[in-house]
Amino acid sequence: MAPYRRGVQWFMTSWRWRLTFACGAGVWLGAGALAQTNKPEPLKTTVQTCGSYQVKITGNGFGEPQDTLRLMKGGRTYATYRDEAVSLDSCTDLTGDGVPEAILTQYSGGAHCCTMGQIYSLTTPPRLLLEQGLSNSTGWEIVQLDGKGPKELLTSDWRFAYAYGLSYAESPALPQVLAYRGGRYVDVTREYPALLLKGIRAPQPEESVSGTFLSNYALYLLAGQPQKAEAYLQTLPRPEREWLQNYAPDIRQNLSTVGLDDWPQRAGGQGGASWRDLRGGAGGSFTRPGTLEYLGTTVRQGRGTVRLYQQRGGQVVASAPLLSFREPADHPELDPLATFTVRRTGGRDDVVLRDELAGRAQLRAYRVSPQRLTELTGDPLGVAARLLSDVENLGRQRERLTDGSSRTDTQKQALQGRIAAALPRAQAWQKTYDPASKTPLNLAKLGVFNVQSVEVYRENASSALVAGVVEMGDVVPGQGYVQRTRQTFAVFLDNKGGTWQVTRWQLSPRQGAGPLDR
């Protein structure tokens, strides 16, 4: 096993760092499991003591049955975890109260993913201080960042895995900081801008320059230095600069949830959720400028809700459900709603939600409050969202028909019916499509039109410009996959007699291919 490494210096040495720490208390029963045989290894049992508890591990590496870890005291089992490999990584007092914490991890054997971890304070009964999906990280590094009190934990944020035309090997992991607050460990990454800035550096010879450049750009943004982030882009080689400029709106939206993804876990009452209930969301200043709030989706026992999460007096509180839905039975693991944060004049954010729960893509713009989501129907953003929604839905229905999936004749007829219903809606908007656009729009062949970001670039009492990014492509007969290109959409609107109307809209190709496409 690798030695236990302490300190921030090692933590920041690589944009692609992966924690591989262990200590004397740790053991991975699956350590030799890469050389698997058809004959399962005999089961082995180890018992380790942590405080007044025992951690009993039974397993044989990656053979059948799965390994089992039990947290026990006096013959009673308080927690049980099963996976391909299970481990007690550390037994140490993290919080400074004299009671040790047991750090547990489980690994499912998947590539580039699939590590789960828990931290229990070994009181009677034990208290769960943290449960986290660690993705490709194998645990947490224990550090003391503020020089006093409970220890902090460092791990990796893998939100950029495979993103923006990167392979996994090129994908950077951002640092994530967890601190002990209110009886649990929570994400406080945004509170350590100096630590984030320490991670900005030149690529090392063995590293992907693209991954390093993306990491540096993101760290400037997370540290609250957008001007330096833009200045940094100007120093990069042209292919890398154009690539990051191409994906900058997507990156900003992605980063909006850093430090907020665990807010549903932190909220108590009906709005509280476990790690497994989380389905994504968006961060923004929804109720007033300058605030940090989270519009999050959770699903529990097939029932989904969207709530607004806010900080009050150091605590995270959840609103009543602003939207409720049943989880899709065919793809329960997917995010049922996609959310785009849109900054408006004055600094307040609205949201655009993509809803595909009813079988058709719908984009709707909303004003958010703790009491309700109010659709913006007579608003330039709302009108632009309806345009994008109608064109996107046509592409989605046609993409489903040509994606190569096995379907019955009845199912194909149903999709043909949806396409027939979607086409007139999209054609109504083609009347205002700018014929001088650099990208032609052929609705008869459109197979993909997926909105990636939405922004209001200009608005006053008489006119507005809503723009963003879409991925689009046409269906080619005999080809199951639709080739996509990234396009900038621009929707120009005028206020005519109190009614916002689209005067023209256009598409133009975006420059800057990802590393895999060069």
Image (tube, rainbow, N blue to C red):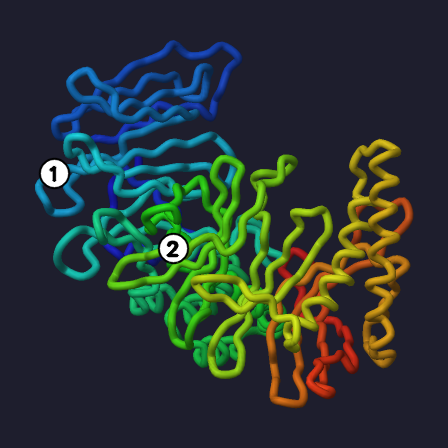
The percent coordinates of residue 110 (x first, y second) are 51, 33
* In the foreground, 342 or 21: 342
Disc 1 target residue: 99
Foreground label between 2 and 1: 2
Kind of residue indicated by mark 1: Val
Disc 2 target residue: 318
What residue do we see at 43% from left, 60% from top?
294
Asked whether residue 267 appears in the rendered view, the answer is yes
The quarter of the rendered structure image containing the C terminus is bottom right
Q: How would you rate the neighbour count of disc 1 (Cα within 10 Å): few for under 14, some for 14-19, many for 20 or more?
A: some
Kind of residue indicated by mark 2: Ala
The percent coordinates of residue 118 (x first, y second) are 31, 37
* Secondary structure category for the residue under label 2: strand
What residue do we see at 30% from left, 65% from top?
191
Residue 129, above or below 110: below
User: What separation in Å lies between label 2 and label 1 (alpha carbons)?
Assistant: 31 Å
- Left or right side of 311 for 243: right
Specify the quadrant of the image occupied by residue 453.
Answer: bottom right
Please tell me the numbered disc located at residue 13: none
Residue 96, above or below 466: above
For this orientation, the residue located farthest to the left is 98
The quarter of the rendered structure image containing the N terminus is top left
